[in-house]
Amino acid sequence: KHVVGFSSRSYSAGSEVVMAEEAKKLAAYAAVDNHIQNNQIVGVGSGSTIVYAVDRLAERVRQEKLKIICVPTSFQARQLILKHGLSLSDLDRHPELDVAIDGADEVDASLTLIKGGGGCLTQEKIVAGCAKHFVVIADYRKDSKALGQQWKKGVPVEVIPMAYVPVSRTIARRFGGEAVLRMAVSKAGPVVTDNSNFILDWKFEHAQNWKEVNTAIKMIPGVVETGLFVGMAERVYFGMEDGSVKIR
Ligand code: 5RP
């Protein structure tokens, strides 16, 4: 196992935000160093942690002259790939990926994930599902024994816009809690995904059988995808507060 560390000097700023950013970078760099090799097709996730992974990937491509082809999971990922001058592809041309790397909002003890904090869950799940290996990178705040202990915003569910009210009611009736339409920060309207859909954030009340719930929610007409990733992640890299990397 590859474990790297920052010097304690890195923490002198003392802020939680600085520590979390450094933890994201640690996890991202370790995952890219351990899982990326020459001639690979790589799925590129979305969010803030993946930014560090693409930085490192671009650095290695430059320094080691690696031939890597990248498949994005979102508009943001596509922009990152282009910004770094990496080779951009898609699932039409490369439907089989060697590895996909992505962030997560919460990871439980059995590597079940909540994803979709950034609203990109559908394309993220498609790309991860096409990869031989799905590797997750996260800071220590995402590490959880059971879903809901760390991430308080609920499970994102992407829905066809016309169905958001019935889907929200059905989820609440069948599984408890509340499924709330995600609004833009400006509150001027709902968040619209890269697929022109809406997001419901399902604030569940108690632990569930996530595999069964994921399947059941997906069966509700109007649901496109859920942010529950069950049995998909193979390895998770957590950047820790003490500068180490925990691999699960
Ligand atoms: C976006 C995602 C992100 O991967 C997830 O929200 C983690 O983001 P960050 O790395 O910013 O914490 O699922 O839809």
Image: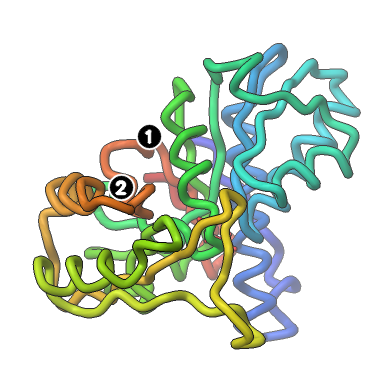
Instruction: Verify CB contact (< 8 Å) between mark 2 and mark 1.
Output: yes
Asked which secondary structure carries label 2, the reply is loop
In the image, residue 12 lies at what x, y percent?
Answer: 73, 82
The residue pinned by badge 2 equals 111
Judge the density around disc 1: few (<14), some (14-19), many (≥20) Cα neighbours within 10 Å.
few
The answer to which image quadrant residue 155 occupies is: bottom left
Q: Compared to 201, does 111 lie above or below?
A: above
Q: Amino acid at mark 1?
A: Glu
Residue 49 is labelled as none
Q: Amino acid at mark 2?
A: Leu
Q: Is residue 54 left or right of residue 232?
A: right
* Residue displayed at 64% across by 19% down: 41
Q: Compared to 156, does 91 lie above or below?
A: above
In the image, residue 72 lies at what x, y percent?
Answer: 66, 37
Residue 211 seen in the current view: yes
Q: Compared to 59, does 87 lie above or below?
A: above
* Residue displayed at 47% across by 51% down: 121
Asked which secondary structure carries label 1, the reply is loop
Q: Please count the marks in the image.
A: 2
In the image, residue 236 lies at what x, y percent?
Answer: 43, 45
In the image, residue 42 lies at what x, y percent?
Answer: 63, 27
Judge the density around disc 2: few (<14), some (14-19), many (≥20) Cα neighbours within 10 Å.
many
Mark found first going from the N terminus, 2 or 1: 2
Q: Is residue 153 left or right of residue 63?
A: left
Instruction: Judge by depth and name the residue closer to the eye, 230 or 183.
Output: 183
Report, in whole angstroms, how far the alpha carbon at label 2 lies from the one at label 1.
8 Å
Q: Is residue 199 left or right of residue 81?
A: left
